[in-house]
Amino acid sequence: MYSFIVNKISGNGKGLKVWKKVEKLLQEKQVNYQVRFTERPKHAIEIVKEISSETCLAVVAIGGDGTIHDVANGLIGSNIPLGIIPAGSGNDLARALDIPMDYKKALERILMGEQRKMDIGRINNEYCITVTGIGFDGKVAEVNNASKFKNLLNFIRLGDLSYAHSVLHVLLKYRPVNIQLKVDGKTLTFFNVWLIAIANTPNYGGGIKICPDACYHDGLFDICIIHSMTKWELLRNFPKAYKGKHVSHPGVTMLKGKEVEVISEWPVIVQSDGELVTKTPVNVTIQKEALLII
Ligand SMILES: Nc1ncnc2c1ncn2[C@@H]1O[C@H](COP(=O)(O)OP(=O)(O)OP(=O)(O)O)[C@@H](O)[C@H]1O
C-alpha cells in the first residue's frame, strides 16, 4: 500500500490539482493506496506517525519543500521510503534529486521502486532535508511565506520568482551581523555577515544554487558564508547565484563540514527547507544516509 500525503494549498492550489490527476492514474493502474490531506503546518508529521511501517511501501508527499520537510520529519527512523511528486512553488528538493516535475513521470519512478539513501541535517529535534539558511535568507523565508505576491506569481505560473521578489523586499532593511562559526571544532569569525547557508543539496529559493557542489550522500554539508559586501554588491551578485557563479566573489567563503555551530552578535532567524525553525545560536549536524528516497 502506498500512502499519499497531499498539501492541497501548496503551489497556490497545485497540490490538489496534481493529486486529482495522480488519483486517476492510480485507479487506472490498480495501485493500492490511501490518501490524507494536511490541514495545517506540521500536520504531515502527525499523519506519518499514524502509518504502519508493516503495510506501507512508501509515503508519497504531494506538495512543495515545506510539505516534504514535514513528511520527512515524521519518517526519519522508520525505514519507510519517501516518494515525491512536486507540487510546490520552488520544488528545490525534487530538482536536487532529479525527480521529474511532471507528475506522471514522478509517479512512474516511485512505482518502479528503486531506492536511494540521502543524508539529512539535524537542528535541535528537527530535521532539514535541503538547506538551512541563517540570517538574511531566514528573514526572506519569513517574508516569502507570508507573501501575497507569492500566491499571485504561483497563479501566473511564475512561482520561482517569488523568492527573488522577497529578497529585494528584505534587502532594503536588513543589517548584516558579526558571526562566530565553529565547523568540526574549528572556530572562525566573520564580520558583516548577510547569510550562512548550510547545504545538503545545492539549491534553494526556487533554483538559487547557493552551494553548487553540495551532494546529498557525501556525509558533509557545504557551507556558504556571504559577508563583507555592500547592499549594492549583494544585489549585483544575486542573479549570479542562480548559476552558482557567486562563489568566486571575495565576499563569499565556501567550507565543508559535518557539524556547524553559529553564534551571532544578536539572534537572527534560521530557516530549513523554507520553514522557520529557530533563531541563533544554533547547532547543525549531518546524519549520514538517514532518509530513504524512492
Ligand atoms: N492545510 C494547510 N493549511 C495551511 N498550511 C498548510 C496546510 N497544509 C500544509 N501547510 C503548510 O504549508 C506550507 C507551504 O507548503 P509547501 O512548502 O509544500 O508549498 P509551497 O510553499 O507552495 O512550495 P515550496 O516550498 O516548494 O516553495 C508548509 O509550511 C506546510 O506545513
Image (cartoon, rainbow, N blue to C red):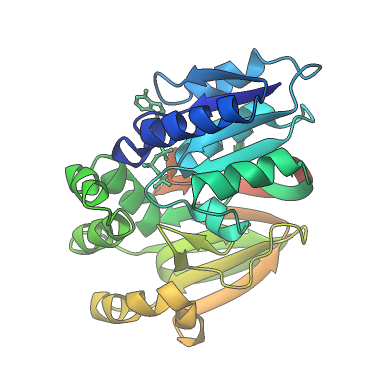
Counting labels gives: 0
- Please identify the quadrant where the N terminus is shown: top right
- Residue at (57, 72) in percent of width and height: 212
175 sits to left or right of 223: left
Give the image location of residue 142, x and y in percent.
32, 44
Please name whichever residue, 81 or 205, is drawn nearer the observer in this view of the structure: 81
Above or below, 275 relative to 208: above
Q: Is residue 78 visible?
A: yes
- Please identify the quadrant where the C terminus is shown: top right
Please name whichever residue, 142 or 91, is drawn nearer the observer in this view of the structure: 91
Q: Is residue 282 visible?
A: no
Q: Quadrant of residue 214?
A: bottom right
Give the image location of residue 251, x and y in percent.
44, 81
Give the image location of residue 145, x and y in percent.
31, 42
Q: Quadrant of residue 20?
A: top left
The quadrant where ligand 1 appears is top left
